[in-house]
Amino acid sequence: MSDSSAVRGSRDDRSGEPRKRTSIPTFYRQVVAELRKVVWPTQDQLVTYFIVVMVFVLAMMALVSALDLGFGKLAFAIFDGSDGV
């Protein structure tokens, strides 16, 4: 199959008839069925994940702040405007 025919093809099945829309109650039942398959984290896992994410975010904030401060001081040193005399 060439790329052009893959792009031009429709999402409908090949029978030529468009697919029917799913009704709202059927959609809701499917959503609930999918959510039952989800493995939800325990409270201990949730606390651990929260701490890991917070530490990572704080570390990234510190890194970006340090780089901002460093580049800011470098820019002021280069473009200070004083003649150095």
Image (cartoon, helix red, strand yellow):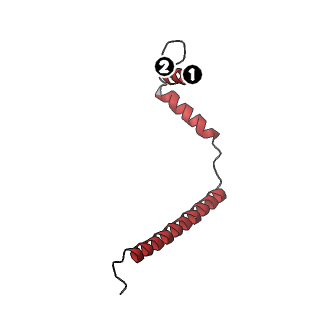
Instruction: Look at the picture and state if 21 lies above or below 81.
Output: above
Judged left or right of residue 32, residue 74 is left
Image quadrant of residue 29? top right
Label 2 amino acid?
A: Lys
Residue that carries the numbered disc 1 in the rendered image: 2
Classify the position of the N terminus by image quarter: top right
* Residue 78 percent location from the top left of the image: 41, 74
- Element type at marker 1? loop
User: Of the residues under marks 1 and 2, which one precedes in the sequence?
Assistant: 1
Which of 8/84 is in front? 84
Q: Position of residue 27 (x, y in %)?
A: 51, 30
Q: Residue at x 43, y 75 (%)?
A: 73
- Looking at the picture, tell me which residue is in the foreground, 12 or 48: 12
- Residue 53 lies, with reference to residue 79, above or below; the image says above
Residue at horizontal 63 percent and vertical 48 percent from the top: 40
The residue tagged 2 is 20
Q: Secondary structure at mark 2?
A: loop
Q: Toward the viewer: 39 or 29?
A: 39
x and y percentages locating residue 10 in the rendered image: 49, 21
